[in-house]
Amino acid sequence: LRDETVSGSHFCQIDKGETVSSICNITFNEINEINTYIRSDLEKLISSDFFKYFKIDLRKECTFWDNKDGLCFSPGCAVDPIDDWAKVPMYWQPDILGSITNNTTEDIDIHDDECSFLDELCAEEKRLPEIPECNYCDVNDFENSNCVLVDLSKNRERFTGYGGNQSREIWSSIYNENCFSFGEVGKSLAKDTFYRLISGFHASIGTHVAFEHLNLEEEDWGPYLEGFMEKVGNFPERVTNIYFNYAVVAKTLLKIQPYLKNIEFCNEYNEDVKRNIMNIVSQLDSTIFNEDLLFENEISSVLKDDFKNRFRNVTKIMDCVQCERCKLWGKLQAVGYATCLKILFELNEGDEISKQDIVDKLTKYELVALLNTFNLLSETIEYVNDFETIYNKQALYGGENQMVSFFKKHNFFKLLKAGTKNMEQKIKEFKDLNVPPEGIVEEKKAAIHSQWENVWDVNVGTFVEGLDFIERKYFTLVRQIKDWFQWLLNRVRH
Ligand SMILES: Cc1cc2nc3c(=O)[nH]c(=O)nc-3n(C[C@H](O)[C@H](O)[C@H](O)COP(=O)(O)OP(=O)(O)OC[C@H]3O[C@@H](n4cnc5c(N)ncnc54)[C@H](O)[C@@H]3O)c2cc1C
C-alpha cells in the first residue's frame, strides 16, 4: 500500500491517506512508515533466545467436536519440536520448569509456573505464587506434561497445504459461534472490534500463506499474487482489518511500557531485551488506537466476561486444528490477541499498583505470544506492500505476460494444429474419391462441393473460434482480422 498506484487505481481498493478506522487516528501510510522504522528491531527481538521458543501441547484433545479422523498428511503440516536440549537456553530447560512442578504444593506452583513471569525465568529469584489473571486464554495449555518446546524460527508460518472442509469448519465455528452475531456487529464498537480482530487474524494468516507459498508445479517457494488477491486483496475490509490489528497490538505494547520495568528477562538478556522493546515501543504513536472510545458507554463487567469467554473459546478451538504447524501459529496468535484484550480491558481501570500487578503477572507465554503476534502482523504489512509492487509490475508489463500465459494456458497453436490435421485428413478423403462415371458428374460435383464446404466449415470454424477466444480476452485488432477473414470467406464461397 505505498503511494504509487497504477493509473490512479488503489491496490486492494484502499485509500492509504485515510484513517484505518474511526477508533484509529492513524492512516495506512503512517502505519506503513512506522512499520518500516521498527521492522529490523522487531526482527532482532523475535530471533532472540527469549522470544523464539514457544511451548505447546500439539496432541491436546479437541473439546468441541470429534476430529479424530481429520489429520493433515501434508509434510508441510509437521512441526519439529526441540530434541537437542543442550542447545536450548537455561530458562527453557525442562528441569528448571520441572523443578517448579515437582514441588509438593503442586497446584499452586503450576500457577506460579504459568503466571509469575519473573519466577519462571530466573530460578534463583522465586517469589510466592499469586493467583493468575490469564483468563482470556486457557492457562492449562502450557502446563501439561505433553507440551513440547518449539523453536519458532525453524517452523515458520507459511503454506502447508492445510485447507478444505477441515479448516473451513474451524473458521466458521470461530466466526459463527464465537463472534458476536451479525445483528450485533455494527451496533457496538466493542463487538465490532471482536469480529475485526478475528478477520484480521484470518487475513494475516492468508497473507503469510500466499507470500510463503509452494508452487507445486515448479516446486519452488515464493509469493503467489493470485492467491493473495483471492483470499485477502480483493476484500478491502480484510486488508483494513490487518492494519486494525496492527494498531490494537501496537497500542497494547504502548500501554504496558510504563510497567515493564519490574519484569526481568533474566540477567543475561535483561538489558538487551528491554532496550530493544523500548526502542520499538518508542517509535509507536499513542493515537494509533483509542480504546477509550471503544469502551465508551458500554464497558460493563457483563460485556467483559462475554469477551473473556468467547476469546477463551477461540484459543481452545485451536486444539481442533489438524495441521500441527497451523495449530502452533494459530494458538500463539490467539494467545497474543487474548493478551491484548486482557491488557486493554484490565489496564483501563484501577490504580497504578493494580496496573503494575497485572503486568508483573503476565506469563512468559503471553509475552512471547504478544510480541510474536506483533511481528507476524508487521511481516504481513510488509508482504502486502510487496504484493502491491508485484501487482503494479504486472499491471505495467501485464500485456505481454498475459498474452504469453494465454497462449500457454489455452494452447491456441495446438488447437490450430489439430484443425490443420483435420483439414489434411479431409483433403485426403476428398482425393480418394473415385472419379464418377459420365451422367452422374453433376450429382458428384454437388457432393464434392458439399464435402469441401464441410471441410471448410469445420476447420475454418475452429480457427475462427480460436480467434474469438483471443479477441474476447485481449485484442480489438483481432476483431478486424476476423471481419476481414469472414469477408474473404464469403467471397470465396459465393
Ligand atoms: C487456525 C488456523 C491456522 C491456519 N494456518 C495455516 C498455515 O499456517 N498455513 C496454511 O497453509 N494454511 C493454514 N490454515 C488454512 C487456511 O487458513 C485456509 O483455511 C485454507 O488455506 C483454505 O482457504 P479457503 O480459501 O478455503 O478459505 P478459508 O481461509 O478457509 O476461509 C473460509 C471462509 O471464511 C471467509 N473468510 C476468509 N477470509 C476471511 C477474512 N479475513 N475475514 C472474514 N472472512 C473471511 C470466506 O467466506 C471463506 O470462504 C489455517 C487454518 C486455521 C483454521
Image (cartoon, rainbow, N blue to C red):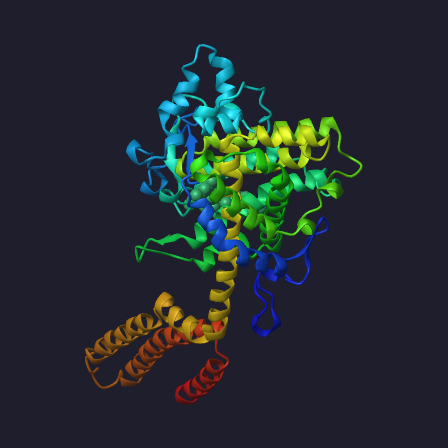
Task: Indicate the quadrant containing the C terminus: top left, top right, bottom left or bottom right.
Answer: bottom left
The residue drawn where x is 72% and y is 48% is 23
Q: Which quadrant holds residue 462?
A: bottom left
Left or right side of 428 for 480: right
Q: Position of residue 123 (x, y in %)?
A: 44, 25
Q: Is residue 472 visible?
A: yes
Comparing 129 with 43, the one in front is 129
Comparing 349 with 406, the one in front is 349
Comparing 320 with 38, the one in front is 38
The residue drawn where x is 40% and y is 15% is 102
The residue drawn where x is 31% and y is 85% is 442
Q: Position of residue 153 (x, y in %)?
A: 38, 44
Left or right side of 360 for 403: left
* Location of residue 410 with respect to 171 vertically, above or below: below
Comparing 336 with 163, the one in front is 336
Q: Which quadrant holds residue 357?
A: top right
Q: Is residue 202 visible?
A: no
* Location of residue 146 with respect to 494 vertically, above or below: above
Left or right side of 254 for 62: left
* Location of residue 4 with respect to 123 vertically, above or below: below
Task: Indicate the quadrant containing the N terminus: top left, top right, bottom left or bottom right.
Answer: bottom right
How many marks are shown on the rendered structure? 0
Q: Which quadrant holds residue 486?
A: bottom left
Q: Position of residue 369 (x, y in %)?
A: 50, 37
Q: Position of residue 319 (x, y in %)?
A: 46, 29
The residue drawn where x is 49% and y is 46% is 205
